[in-house]
Image (spheres, rainbow, N blue to C red):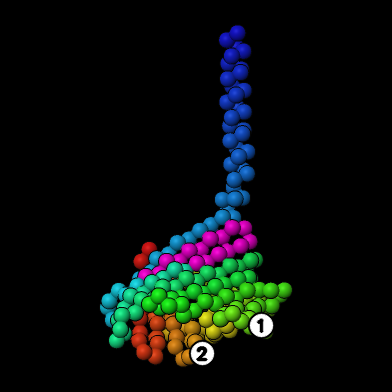
Amino acid sequence: MVQQVKKYIIARVHFFFITLLVLLLLLIPILVKTQSLLLHYKIVQGGDEIGWLRLEKNIAGSQSRLLLVSEINTRFIIRIRVSATESSTFENGKLVHSAQFRKTNGETKVDKQTRLVSGNYEVMENGGTEKLSIRFIGTNLLSLYFQEPVGINQVYCDKHAGFITVTKTGDGGYRVKFPDGNSNIFYYSRGICTRIRISHTFYTAEIIKTT
């Protein structure tokens, strides 16, 4: 009787560990394919902190989703409060949808989307749709927070609905120049953006990674 009980207990323990092992093996592909990253930045102008950015990157299988949320409170003759949200979705390394939304002092200034439709890109803004002669977008401006553009000489700019050039600077940064003449220089550590120098016609500022 005692021997039977021992055999029963051993069999149950064995069954438990086999079941646990099978579950772990089933979970491994999910754990490997699902990744997330959260970054925080502060916006500094003239030594004063005037705003913040929060960025998220979520990877699930072949899909990658990027999100940026930001807020700026400053004074330029009058008090200015800007809140913005940007998102991008990539499928197998190809942009399939992006969106930009920005409010200034409560008034919507930007509400724009880029999406892939039947192999071509369309931009929707102000109730209209513009078809682009672009068939592939692998990197856009939002991607540069998460990816050092090594070997990349152009990225898609959602705001201007076109590609902008990327050039390496002498101090190890990467300059992106916009059609309006303004530019940003991105700096990296281990592939993640740590600082951005903003050069605008009317001001300069820095975006600095905090966590």
Observer-nearest of 26 and 131: 131
Quarter holding the C terminus is bottom left
What's the residue type where badge 1 is placed? Answer: Lys
Which residue was labeled with disc 2? 179
Check the image and report above or below for 156 versus 89.
Answer: below
Q: CA distance from mark 2 to mark 1?
A: 19 Å
Task: Give the number of the mark in front: 2 or 1.
Answer: 1
* Main SS class of the magenta portion in the image: strand
Which secondary structure, mark 1? strand
| Among numbered discs 2 and 1, the one appearing first in the sequence | 1
In the image, residue 35 lies at what x, y percent?
Answer: 53, 57
Give the residues drawn in magenta, as a range. Answer: 52-67
Observer-nearest of 158 and 153: 158
Which secondary structure, mark 2? loop
Indicate the quadrant where residue 155 lies: bottom right
Which residue was labeled with disc 1? 131
